[in-house]
């Protein structure tokens, strides 16, 4: 990416904000850095993996004592406060006679996934493999008596898929000294976490890395209060036993090889380290018989492309039943994702992030050296125009059919922008995501300045704004690039952008639910300055809009009023809350300020 002086100044103002959102990092020697990059190579090329949550919680499948238990299926022991002896009886009923490792691996492979991460031990403490450390495991405690991890290891080898294990290192509701079980073991009681760690965690992780051949990664989870030394020892143990094996970010204390975004959360990108979004296809991870809230294949394909465009990996979950069957709803959707991947996988595997620092209204961009892939979710009739690409395009194609796309490239010197215009068929070739490949001459240079788009809309994302914090303020961006803890009137944000098409605009403020669910505060009085004009309005819920990064929680749109931009060129804008009602929990959860051409 070539940076203009203005662009550089601008990037400086947003980068620290973006970087601050990543997890704290452990300092590395250059040699450790190199080893980590080598370990990460296959994983960053893969981009797409299968998560499998499977355990004895699939026997009750979300129901206890004849009543549905709200929440995640694999959390039933905790949510229903089931005593250990009661819960342990489920092992006697767990007999997944329909389990077929080759079939599961084929579902992953046909979807275009390159790795598979399965729960070897979840928070319930039950080992889903033959463990010598504890008899509380699938081989010794169930009528099944088989080791599915052995069978999966062999099936993965045959199919060329990397096998990875999930391991809950801190929570273990079966153990008095571990974290989490406050119904069998009083919360205030003395717990010797180190004892549990030494006697169960370390030897079980050792087993997983010794008995199942090469393992791609160990997916530790919910680090809670694990100490720095304990996280470090686990990471070291993994690397000592299998130097090529990755350690997930959730090992804790910044000791992992890569970062994990929150569950079902897509990171804003521009992160210091490779990262991954673990996601569900319905609402639960572990099977629940009453969870029918399935995301469509379109949502899954679009999430995959969006995550790749921000430089991340997509770890998509299936929750097989107690019989060992992956729900057909998941299998069908994954098959459709697979059909899309067969035709368009080149725009996902081994790609890098969008070289522009902002997103486009029609969809995301992924890249490779000398290539850009435009993932068009909203198909424009007849033509798509892209501003800010400074390199010469040699050829353009519809990737799936390899049909050439006619294009022109021009520079509007007077107004200072470059435009690539692609002539497109009227119908979208793929309703889920039609990919246009651009072959670029030399390196890909883009103008990183925020600029008005060809549809004349101007979007000022929070992730590209500069925060001005009042003393003691805690305002920042969450990992999705949404403002959080903006509860003080003294904090404000500013942007600089380029006007290409002067005119009259409606001003919209886009806000989000808080990061992990429903939670939104309105009612803040804000002052928006655009160039020399200023207007004041109250943030209200004037309508909803799809959130491309999370289908669960749509964005909230507040309409503020109108403004005029009379001349092309650079303009400054700022957003200052004059009044935030006292006691707000979430504050101004800003995603972007948008100027939409007035009708
Ligand atoms: O508590 C777990 C949950 O059950 C599930 O395993 C997810 C997957 O990312 N991780 C934890 C919550 O973040």
Image: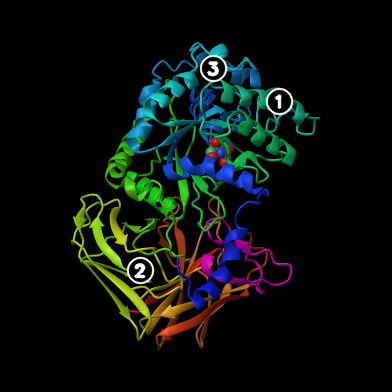
What number is the disc on residue 446? none
The vertical placement of 349 against 478, above or below, is: above
Mark toward the start of the polypeptide (3 vs 2): 3
**Could you tell me which residue is drawn at 25 percent across and 60 percent down?**
396
Q: How crowded is mark 3: few (under 14 residues within 10 Å), some or many (20 or more)?
A: many
Mark 1 element type: loop
Name the residue that disc number 3 marks: 138
Mark 3 element type: helix
Disc 1 and disc 2 in contact, CB within 8 angstroms: no
What number is the disc on residue 184? 1
Rendering coords of residue 537 (x, y %):
52, 77
Name the residue that disc number 2 marks: 391
**Could you tell me which residue is drawn at 37 percent across and 48 percent down?**
348
Q: Residues within 10 Å of mark 2 (few under 14, many from 20)?
A: some
- Relative side of 228 to 360, left or right: right
Disc 3 and disc 2 in contact, CB within 8 angstroms: no
**Could you tell me which residue is drawn at 22 percent across and 53 percent down?**
429
């Amino acid at each position: 990416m070539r940076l203009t002086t203005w662009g550089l100044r601008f990037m400086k103002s947003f980068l620290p904000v973006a970087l601050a959102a990543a997890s704290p990092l452990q300092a590395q020697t250059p040699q450790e850095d190199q080893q980590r990059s080598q370990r990460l190579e296959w994983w960053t090329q893969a981009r797409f993996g299968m998560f499998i949550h499977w355990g004895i919680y699939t026997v009750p499948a979300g129901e206890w004592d004849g009543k549905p238990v709200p929440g995640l299926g694999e959390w039933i022991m905790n949510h229903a406060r089931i005593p250990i002896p009661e819960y342990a009886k489920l092992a006697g009923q767990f007999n997944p006679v329909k389990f077929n490792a080759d079939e599961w691996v084929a579902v992953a492979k046909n979807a275009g996934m390159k790795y598979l991460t399965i729960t070897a031990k979840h928070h319930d403490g039950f080992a889903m493999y033959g463990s010598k450390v504890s008899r509380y495991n699938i081989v010794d405690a169930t009528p099944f008596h088989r080791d599915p991890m052995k069978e999966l290891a062999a099936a993965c080898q045959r199919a060329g898929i990397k096998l990875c294990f999930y391991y809950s290192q801190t929570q273990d509701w079966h153990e008095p000294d571990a974290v989490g079980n406050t119904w069998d073991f009083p919360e205030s009681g003395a717990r010797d976490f180190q004892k549990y760690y030494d006697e169960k965690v370390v030897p079980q992780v050792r087993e997983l890395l010794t008995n199942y051949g090469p393992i791609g990664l160990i997916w530790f989870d919910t680090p809670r209060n694990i100490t720095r030394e304990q996280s470090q020892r686990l990471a070291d143990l993994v690397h000592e036993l299998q130097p090529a094996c990755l350690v997930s970010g959730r090992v804790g204390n910044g000791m992992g090889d890569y970062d994990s975004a929150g569950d079902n959360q897509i990171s804003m990108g521009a992160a210091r380290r490779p990262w991954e979004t673990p996601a569900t296809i319905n609402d639960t991870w572990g099977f629940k018989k009453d969870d029918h809230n399935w995301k469509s294949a379109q949502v899954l394909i679009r999430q995959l492309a969006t995550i790749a465009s921000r430089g991340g990996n997509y770890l998509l979950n299936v929750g097989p039943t107690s019989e060992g069957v992956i729900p057909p709803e998941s299998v069908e959707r994954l098959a459709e994702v697979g059909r899309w991947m067969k035709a368009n996988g080149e725009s996902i595997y081994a790609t890098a992030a969008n070289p522009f620092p902002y997103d486009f209204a029609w969809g995301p961009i992924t890249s490779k050296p000398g290539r850009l892939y435009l993932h068009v979710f909203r198909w424009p009739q007849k033509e798509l125009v892209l501003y800010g690409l400074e390199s010469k395009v040699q050829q353009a194609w519809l990737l799936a059919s390899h049909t050439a796309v006619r294009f022109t490239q021009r520079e509007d010197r007077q107004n200072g922008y470059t435009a690539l215009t692609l002539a497109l068929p009227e119908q979208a070739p793929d309703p889920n995501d039609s990919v246009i490949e651009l072959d670029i001459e030399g390196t890909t240079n883009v103008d990183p300045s925020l600029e008005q788009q060809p549809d004349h809309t101007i979007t000022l994302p929070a992730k590209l704004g500069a925060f001005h914090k009042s003393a003691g303020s805690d305002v920042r961006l969450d990992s999705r690039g949404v403002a959080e803890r903006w509860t003080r009137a003294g904090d404000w944000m500013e942007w600089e952008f380029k006007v290409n098409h002067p005119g009259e605009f409606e001003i919209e403020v886009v806000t989000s639910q808080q990061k992990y669910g429903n939670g939104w505060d309105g009612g803040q009085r804000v002052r928006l300055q655009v160039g020399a004009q200023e207007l004041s309005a109250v943030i209200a819920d004037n309508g909803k809009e799809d959130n491309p990064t999370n289908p669960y929680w749509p964005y909230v749109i507040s309409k503020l009023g109108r403004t005029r931009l009379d001349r092309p060129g650079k303009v400054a804008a700022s957003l200052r809350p004059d009044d935030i009602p006292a006691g707000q929990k979430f504050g101004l959860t800003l995603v972007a300020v948008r100027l939409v051409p007035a009708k």
